[in-house]
Image (cartoon, rainbow, N blue to C red):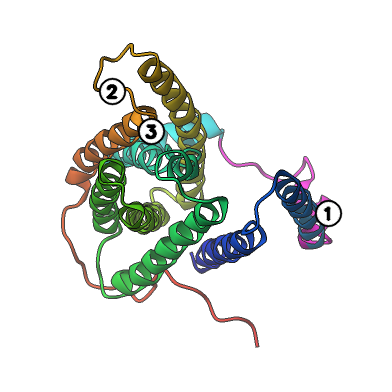
Amino acid sequence: PRMVALMYAMLLVGMVGSGLLYSVLLSSFSPLRLIQVIQGSASVVLAMNLLAMWKQEPRRPDLTAPSQPRADRFESAWRVFMATPGHRRFFVSVFMGTAAFSMQDIILEPYGAEVLGLTVSQTSFLTVLLAGGALLAFWLSARALKTGYTPNFLAAMGALVGTLAFSLVIFSEPLGSPFMFQSGTSLIGFGGGLFSIGTLSAAMAMESGGHTGLALGAWGAVQATSLGLSMALGGGLRDLVSGLALHGDLGGVLTSVGAGYSAVYHLELLLLFMTLVALGPLVKSFKHSPKGEAFGLAEFPG
């Protein structure tokens, strides 16, 4: 759990740092500058990945030999794991909640630029707001889990924060308020962080027949699948509804460029309420006696 916490924290720190750097590099925007930034980013990513992977996992033929004993088939282990009461409901909650927070991923910056008139530098800074909110959620979650708050309760609180966040984003268009939009963006990161850490901690606690690793892998698979499908759906729905609105097919009221974005945000609100309904029976209590093994960063060696 502490290694996962370290990985999650470094991911968010990287997002904050890169978002700040992009805001500075794109402050004097031009198509050539954008191409240069993209090319430079690709080169840095390639170099950092090669450096990170170098001699990271040496070959161990003694551990992968065919003569080594193998565990039961995945199908039978998965059937036993999902038969445990509450597991199916939990992963349905993870899927819907992840979709609710991720559907806006590829349309948030275009929304700020196209609807609210933000500059490229300002929209790049939205990544900093998202990651900053998630980092704050990470810190508060670690403290809350240490004092005994249950992981599913944290996940439910994240979904509740998400309903406020998307409401602010929706109302920022008619009110013409970039500040309201930026506040909503920060809360999306905060609520999504609470939800992710809450569900991840709950998955780590699923010790059903020694299937802790299976639970963590299932959490990652469900989250990744939901993330990919929801981003594709969000972009496609935005394009479809915006096209209908601009052609007047949705009536005289819905003719603004923000109609497609608003449709996605409203769908995310619906998914968050559905997530709360699914999570409800799993939140049996707000707190329990802390066990001493909290979700937080491990100390560095030495």
For marks 3 and 2, give the one nearer the viewer: 2
Distance (Cα) linking label 1 and label 3: 49 Å
For marks 2 and 1, give the one nearer the viewer: 2
Q: Is residue 66 magenta?
A: yes
**Helix, strand or loop status at disc 3:** helix
Whether tag 3 and tag 2 are in contact, CB under 8 A, the answer is no
**Helix, strand or loop status at disc 2:** loop
Question: Can the viewer see residue 103?
Answer: yes
Distance (Cα) linking label 3 and label 2: 12 Å
Q: How many marks are shown on the rendered structure?
A: 3
> How many residues crowd around disc 2 within 10 Å: few (fewer than 14), some, or many (20 or more)?
some
Label placed on residue 254? 2
Question: Would residue 147 be found to the left or right of residue 121 on screen?
Answer: left
Question: Would residue 122 be found to the left or right of residue 79 on screen?
Answer: right
Residues in magenta, as a range: 52-72
Question: Can the viewer see residue 291?
Answer: no
Residue depicted at 50% across the width and 65% down the height: 5
Give the mark, 3 or 2, whose residue is nearer the N terminus.
2
Q: Quadrant of residue 202?
A: bottom left
Residue depicted at 48% across the width and 36% down the height: 77
Q: Quadrant of residue 17?
A: bottom right
Residue matched to label 1:
59
Label placed on residue 261? 3
Distance (Cα) linking label 2 and label 1: 60 Å
Whether tag 1 and tag 3 are in contact, CB under 8 A, the answer is no
Q: Residue 58 at what x, y percent from top left?
A: 82, 58
Amino acid type, mark 3: Tyr
> How many residues crowd around disc 3 within 10 Å: few (fewer than 14), some, or many (20 or more)?
many
For marks 1 and 3, give the one nearer the viewer: 3
Q: Residue 241 at what x, y percent from top left?
A: 38, 21
The image shows residue 296, relative to residue 160, as above or below, that is: below
